[in-house]
Amino acid sequence: MVRFECPSCGAETAPDCSPHCPQCGTEVRTCGEILFSSFDSLRLALLALAEGRDKDAHDFAYESWSLHHTVEAASAGLLAAVLLKEPVEIARWIRRRRRLLVGAP
Ligand SMILES: [Zn+2]
């Protein structure tokens, strides 16, 4: 089950239980589907890393990042880029991860 704060009022929502925020009525199912897809892509990235499929891992990490910017997606992407020995991608993932960790531009 995916839980997150309503983008309108900040109340905790569970779109698996209700497509609308229980406090303000905002439609939250679409946000829930995006977050679930991001988590699923991250899971696939981690599985690909464990199986030595570095290119797949990088693609799934980027997919996860595209849906939801998380430190976990940036970390998986960074690890995959290191394994692929892609210096440009390594630099990009470091910047993405740093932005989330310290709020740097
Ligand atoms: Zn709300």
Image (tube, rainbow, N blue to C red):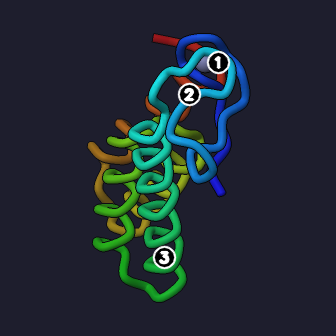
**Residue in the image at 40% along x and 44% along y:** 65
Q: Amino acid at mark 3?
A: Leu
Specify the label residue 49 is tagged with: 3
Res 58 quadrant in image? bottom left
- The image quadrant where one finds the N terminus is bottom right
Q: Is mark 2 within 8 Å of ligand 1?
A: no
- Give the camera-side residue of 87 and 16: 16
Q: Amino acid at mark 2?
A: Arg
Residue at 35% in and 36% down: 92
Q: Amino acid at mark 1?
A: Val
Alpha carbon distance from label 2 to label 3: 22 Å
Q: Residue 50 lies in what quarter of the image? A: bottom right
Which one is earlier in the sequence, the residue at label 1 or at label 3? 3
Tell me how far mark 1 sits from mark 3, CA to CA.
26 Å
Label 3 beta carbon within 8 A of ligand 1: no
Q: Is the residue 33 above or below the residue 59 in the image?
A: above
Q: Nearer the viewer, residue 70 or 105?
A: 70
What label does residue 98 carry, if any?
A: 2
Q: Quadrant of ligand 1?
A: top right
Q: Where is residue 89? Give x, y as percent.
A: 31, 46
* Image marks 2 and 1: residues in contact by CB distance under 8 Å: yes
Please tell me whether residue 35 is drawn above or below residue 1 in the rendered image. Answer: above
Q: Earlier in the sequence, mark 2 or mark 3?
A: 3
Image coordinates of residue 72 in percent, x first then y, are 59, 49
- Circles 1 and 3: CB distance less than 8 Å? no
Residue 39 percent coordinates (x, y): 52, 57
Q: Is residue 38 above or below residue 70?
A: below
Residue labelled with disc 1: 102
* Residue in the image at 44% along x and 52% along y: 38
Residue in the picture at 59% in, 40% down: 71
Secondary element type, mark 3: helix
